[in-house]
Image: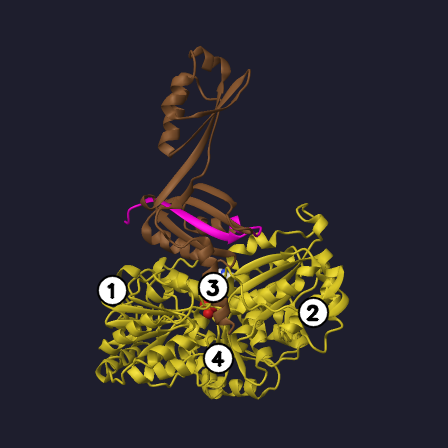
Chain colours: A yellow, B brown
Amino acid sequence: MKQNITGAQALMESLLHEGVDTIFGYPGGAIIPVFDAMYDYTDKLHYVLTRHEQGATHAAQGYARVSGKVGVCIVTSGPGATNTITGIGDALMDSTPMVVITGQVGKSLLGTDAFQEIDLVGITQPITKWSYQIRDEKEIPWAVARAFYIAKSGRPGPVVLDFAKNAQTAKFDYEPATCTFIRSYLPNHPLDNEAVAKAAQLINQAKKPLALVGHGVTIGQAEEELKAFLDKADIPAAWTLLGESAMPTSYRLNKGMLGMHGNIGPNIKTNECDLLIAIGMRFDDRITGDLNVYAKQAKVIHFDIDIAEIDKNVKTDVAVLGDVKNTLPAVTAQLENNAHTEWIDSFKQYEELEMEKVIRHELNPPAGSPITMGEVVRKVSDATQRKAILVTDVGQNQMEAVRYFQFDEKRSVVTSGGAGTMGFGIPAAIGAKIAKPKRTVCLFCGDGGFQMTMQELGTIIQEKMDVKIILMNNNYLGMVRQWQELFFQQRYSSTPMVNPDFNAIAQAYGIPTRLVNQREELDSAIADMLNSTNSYLLVVNVQEKSLVYPMTPAGGAVTTILLNENNK
Amino acid sequence: MEEKTIYTITIFSENNPGLLNQITTVFTRRQINIETLSVSPSALKGIHKFTITVQTDKPTIEKVVKQIDKRVDILKAYYNNDSELVYQEIALYKLATDKVLALGGIEPLIRKYNARVLEILDNCVVLEKTGLYEETQEMFDELARTTGVLQFIRSGRVAITRGRIERLSDMLASIEKRRQEEQL
Ligand SMILES: Cc1ncc(C[n+]2csc(CCOP(=O)(O)OP(=O)(O)O)c2C)c(N)n1
Ligand SMILES: [Mg+2]
């Protein structure tokens, strides 16, 4: 209990009560009282001043994704608030726990089009789990407790607290609040023993089971439980973009990536398996392609904590609702030890095909040919001994990064999946590094995405951080160019980029940097980057007109896979 | 294509501002028109009840209702088809008094449609009829032909389920039980 403190101070106390130690954001008129209060809390709360509110949200996302804690942003009203929309939407799509606190004009001005008044609650209702306006200081402890509970429980997601200025300055007697229950919101599901038994039975009977591993495994911290499950019944598993690193790359049952630029094997096998076991994933269209021809031959088991995902895209035979941390072991207990040797071996022919048609060239291109993205990624991965955290931006760079980076450790990938937000990379890498300062953070981005949030280099130097940025420059909005080449008769509308001297930009920020044009320089440049105790910008000029393969064209069958230009 | 029919969605929610917006965006995203909507306090203090009718197919209604139910402030959302419900609408009709008198009296009409007179003034008469959409519409059509209708308004549907499905208070009790179990 603290007597007679301001609402702004009460917010600080409430955040500490929730265990917050890091906040990302940007100040402004309608939130000045909060920043003023924060001035007295700098020993307990690390405030990271980003260079744009969008950056603050992505940094909070990066922080949340690698730490499992709630990411927190504090920004001002009006344009400060609307600048957070992209990050809020991204966090909803990727189930990232985040609390965004925005300033708002005082109660007496609400609804009058006052200076920097924007109806943020109205705007964010469809893209948050909860969006609430605090108009009275006495609501602060309750609202903050509730916001954190909602953000992190069940299927995590973003919450907005719109904080009217009068409530920031008014004084009251603060009493901490805790929220563990909301009667209209039941995020957990009691274990359904019948569903568990049915699921186990289907798995025990299956001859050709295939598991699809999604973000839910990482969110539920169920990596061990997943391994026990897969090991016992000997089930090959493939991952969605956000499910990467839930299994080590070298794990014998890890059969690679699903979806549009995923590995051939798991995509083909999706339409050959007799049982599809979806674990904390939501059958995004980038995974399934045309649903009318998706896994029609298979029975489907769906493990998920969000009942609204069940039967949304793919009809399930058995739904096991709940946190996979609990449901997986419950099913595992009823599994028979099994071996699906022949089925698992049948993936090999596709691994070999992909190696021959795609991977070999991507990783070992002929001497004298332009540098490929894949070889850059794999070299950095090798040089960091599979121990680094991978952060990506969006585009070809992202797809090649997730395809060729390798992992020993869990919780090691931060990428914008559901929203595919260009500009996510730099700020997300900042947040990831702040959450895990001892780990190496490698960001791969393109020339386009880098320029969407490159002002965050300022945050990097202000925070004296060590983030390794690898900019794979193809002087194109490469992924869009790829679609134009393949599906729009090579009409390169608005995809060639006239780019600045990226090294000079890094230098202006005092960030060590190097430019690589030749394959022979790559190893030494990577070594320079990793030996530096500073942040580093490694610019690699890569092949301009390369295409990411394999590719399942949008809306096609999972099994319609392009391997190269001539598809031979 | 799945067949489209009328579904009635019933939603119980906390009485917080902004809830209607949260509900309607779920329909907007899927391009579903709301046919009728009625909102009022429920029998339990602090809990609001929404009754919404839409025309759509079964797979869609299932998904939509789950997405509404998922919202934090929604206690419960479910859907029914017409055969599972007893439902009603109410309509008001404003007619010009002189036109009504020129008709030579209103008794036959009132009897025929089982309508009520709410108000009689020098210049206008207000009638009320409760009934299904087709019934209130039929009376409107006849009045439009005979006296003309100055103003017409029809309410959204209100509905009650036929089956003995759980009542709101039962549901709240079961939520409370779960809370106690979870917090043990
Ligand atoms: C904010 C945003 N705007 C536009 C897009 C559409 N888009 C997807 S990939 C891409 C090109 C990315 O170019 P670049 O960053 O250079 O990466 P590359 O594909 O060349 O590796 C674009 C424009 C997007 N995903 N996000
Ligand atoms: Mg590019």
What is the chain identity of the residue bearing mark 1? A
Real-space CA distance between mark 3 and mark 2, rounded to the nearest whole angstrom = 28 Å
Q: Quadrant of residue A87?
A: bottom right
Real-space CA distance between mark 1 and mark 2, rounded to the nearest whole angstrom = 53 Å
Q: Nearer the viewer, mark 1 or mark 2?
A: 2
What residue range appears in magenta? B1-21
Q: Disc 1 marks which amino acid? A: Lys
What is the chain identity of the residue bearing mark 2? A
| Residue at disc 2, secondary structure | helix
Look at mark 3 in the image and give the residue it sits on: A93
Residue B19 is covered by the magenta coloring: yes
What is the chain identity of the residue bearing mark 3? A
Q: Nearer the viewer, mark 2 or mark 4?
A: 2
Look at mark 2 in the image and give the residue it sits on: A12
Q: Earlier in the sequence, mark 3 or mark 4?
A: 3
Look at mark 1 in the image and give the residue it sits on: A296
Residue A145: percent from the left, percent from the top? 61, 67
Look at mark 4 in the image and give the residue it sits on: A412
Q: Earlier in the sequence, mark 3 or mark 1?
A: 3
Q: Earlier in the sequence, mark 3 or mark 2?
A: 2
